[in-house]
Image (cartoon, helix red, strand yellow):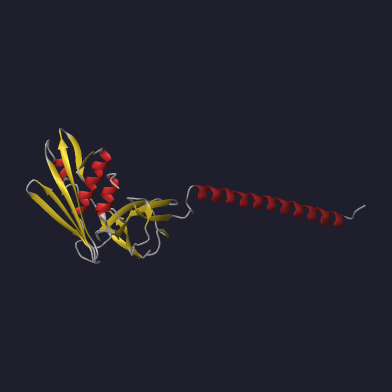
Amino acid sequence: MLASGSYKSITGFKERILNFNVLTIQLSNFIRLTFILLFARLSLGVFAQTVVEVTLLNCEYNEPNDKLSFCVLYAMEGNRSKEIAQLRPSGQSHFFIDTLQPGNYKLLFPNQHPIILTEQEFELIAGDTTEVTLCLDRFKNDVENHVSVINALEHGESYWLFYESHGCFHLTKDSIQVMNKEGKIQFLYHQKIYALNAKKIDAIISFEYALNQLNPISSCTTHDYYWVRYKEEERKFKEGACSWRGWTKLIDKLGLT
């Protein structure tokens, strides 16, 4: 038969075990709830990393371009912009920008030919990866300030595109005549007439837009010259950076290679 003191000791021990079990269950529930809340917040993107993934391309041929020397990141605040960082991704065609707050941003960068600054705006959402593509070979086509000759052609009219390339060991000449024959756009190349579909007409339009923004400053030994002759008007353009090769690309897009 247990003494009164022994009984109280055992009873107190059982109570401590019971309290410990209750505390363990409460702690377990707390940890479980914490993990549930953490998972939920991660699912909602609260703690997920906000990243900008930037890809540099020659978009005309969908090729990676690792020649970008610099770009400037701006935060957009209404109609104003604030410089955030200057980035130098030279040697890379793909890079990431992180630690940014959600909001509207833009990247200012030079394209290859001509060397003019181009803007690319994007919106950054919390917990999301925003993909941005910079086309380093894309011209900023100003439709308001330039109407392509091909769109101005009337029935029976035509115009000429001339090309000359001067180098230390070469002199290349070429030309295309674009014609409107009874509402159908055709072109003459090397004494042969070809029909122009919508895709090829767009190629000529893009070519004309690009001519208006060529950089005439010479930086190599080859100089490419272009003329657009329509009625009594003739416009001449020079590209001296050896980087555009617009005539070769136009001939390729017209299916003449």
Q: How far from the left and from the top, in percent, is residue 45?
A: 47, 50
Q: How far from the left and from the top, in percent, is residue 43?
A: 51, 47
Find residue 223 and report its image quarter.
Answer: bottom left
Residue 11 showing in the rendered view:
yes
Q: What residue is shown at x 65% (from left), y 53% (from top)? A: 27
Q: Residue furthest top?
A: 182
In the depicted view, which residue is nearer to us: 19 or 86? 86
Q: What residue is shown at x 85% (from left), y 54% (from top)? A: 7
Does residue 145 appear left or right of residue 62 in this picture?
Answer: left
Q: What residue is shown at x 36% (from left), y 52% (from top)? A: 133
Q: How far from the left and from the top, in percent, is residue 219?
A: 24, 67
Residue 139 showing in the rendered view:
no
In the depicted view, which residue is nearer to us: 163 or 102? 163
Q: Residue furthest front?
A: 191
In the depicted view, which residue is nearer to us: 105 or 187? 187
Find residue 16 and report its image quarter.
Answer: bottom right
Does residue 162 appear left or right of residue 29 in this picture?
Answer: left
Q: Residue furthest left?
A: 232
Does residue 42 appear left or right of residue 92 in this picture?
Answer: right
Above/below status of 179 relative to 167:
above
Q: What residue is shown at x 64% (from left), y 49% (from top)? A: 29
